[in-house]
């Protein structure tokens, strides 16, 4: 009788661990699938982003031409580094100093500002959807870490410049260059690259070819930053 009781207890104990084993296997499967996803995008163009899919479904249409990093003028990556992420080549996906400053500004009641790096924006665009909830932000941090390790900076910048939204239905540097300036992205001047970088925070209401007063001033600042990015080696991780 005692032996039967002990046997039943052992079966209960073994059965109790099954949900944990299942969750462990599920977590491992998710990790492997996301890693495979990131590895695939390391070598092939990102087929679509959630915002592109939104434009396709609502009938807006999408204009996009994927080009290699070498087919984009060095002026453009330097412009977006100067405008969006001056420490792009120095950080591992997150600019903690910028995050701290943004939190201080927001808590003090100042103008709301973000602190997303180019790596974070690339992770969001390539793998996720727009939003600010904690689940989305957590996944963004996870994918940011993965692409920093698996892709490297040059590939991150290449993907960013090919999937970023530059206007209504206009995605990527090549499509934007042809849309606004009727030329290839490899031929962008400093002024043109600065204007494209200036519209990134608000690509729906800003225009690179007919900029308003604010965009003109902002683009002028970015144009002055481009040679500084080059001189100070802020683009050193890109090999340009």
Image (cartoon, rainbow, N blue to C red):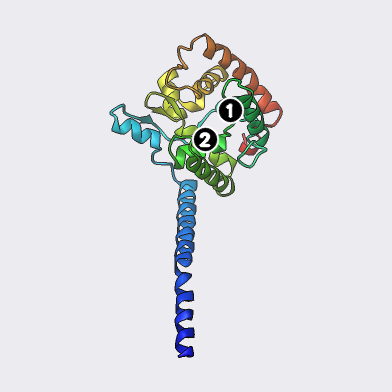
154 lies above or below 82: below
Which residue in the protein does label 1 denote?
Answer: 84
Counting from the top left corner in percent of width and height, residue 63 is at: 36, 29
Q: Which residue is more in the foreground, 121 or 3?
A: 3
Does dot 1 land on a helix, a strand or a loop?
Answer: helix
Residue 121: numbered disc: 2
Q: Relative to 62, is 1 on the left or the right?
A: right
Q: Which residue is more in the foreground, 126 or 155?
A: 126
Looking at the rendering, which quadrant does residue 220 occupy?
top right
Could you tell me if residue 157 is visible in this image? no
Marks 2/1 in contact by CB < 8 Å: the verdict is yes
Quarter of the rendering occupied by the C terminus: top right
Counting from the top left corner in percent of width and height, residue 84 is at: 58, 28
Q: Residue furthest front?
A: 1
29 lies above or below 219: below
Q: Which residue is more in the foreground, 83 or 189?
A: 83
Q: Relative to 53, is 39 on the left or the right?
A: right
Could you tell me if residue 81 is visible in this image? yes
Looking at the rendering, which quadrant does residue 222 occupy?
top right
Does dot 2 land on a helix, a strand or a loop?
Answer: helix
Near mark 1 (Cα within 10 A), the count class, few <14, some 14-19 or many ≥20, is some
Between the C-alphas of marks 2 and 1, the distance is 10 Å
């Amino acid at each position: 009788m005692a032996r039967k009781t002990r046997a039943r207890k052992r079966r209960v104990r073994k059965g109790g661990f099954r949900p944990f084993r299942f969750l462990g296997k599920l977590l491992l499967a998710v990790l492997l699938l996301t890693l495979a996803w990131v590895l695939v995008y390391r070598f092939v163009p990102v087929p679509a982003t959630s915002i592109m899919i939104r434009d396709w479904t609502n009938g807006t249409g999408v204009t996009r031409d994927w080009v290699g990093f070498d087919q984009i003028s060095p002026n453009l990556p330097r412009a977006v580094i100067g405008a969006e992420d001056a420490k792009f080549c120095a950080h591992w996906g997150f600019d903690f100093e910028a995050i701290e400053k943004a939190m201080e500004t927001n808590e003090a009641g100042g103008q709301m500002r973000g602190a997303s790096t180019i790596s974070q924006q690339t992770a969001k665009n390539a793998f996720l959807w727009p939003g600010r909830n904690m689940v989305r932000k957590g996944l963004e941090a996870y994918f940011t870490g993965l692409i920093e390790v698996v892709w490297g900076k040059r590939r991150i910048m290449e993907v960013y410049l090919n999937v970023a939204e530059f206007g209504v239905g206009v995605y990527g540097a090549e499509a934007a260059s042809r849309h606004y300036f009727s030329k290839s992205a490899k031929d962008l001047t400093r002024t043109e690259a600065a204007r494209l970088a200036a519209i990134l925070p608000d690509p729906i209401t800003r225009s690179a070819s007919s900029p308003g007063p604010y965009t003109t001033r902002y683009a002028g600042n970015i144009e002055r930053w481009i040679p500084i990015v080059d001189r100070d080696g802020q683009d050193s991780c890109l090999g340009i």
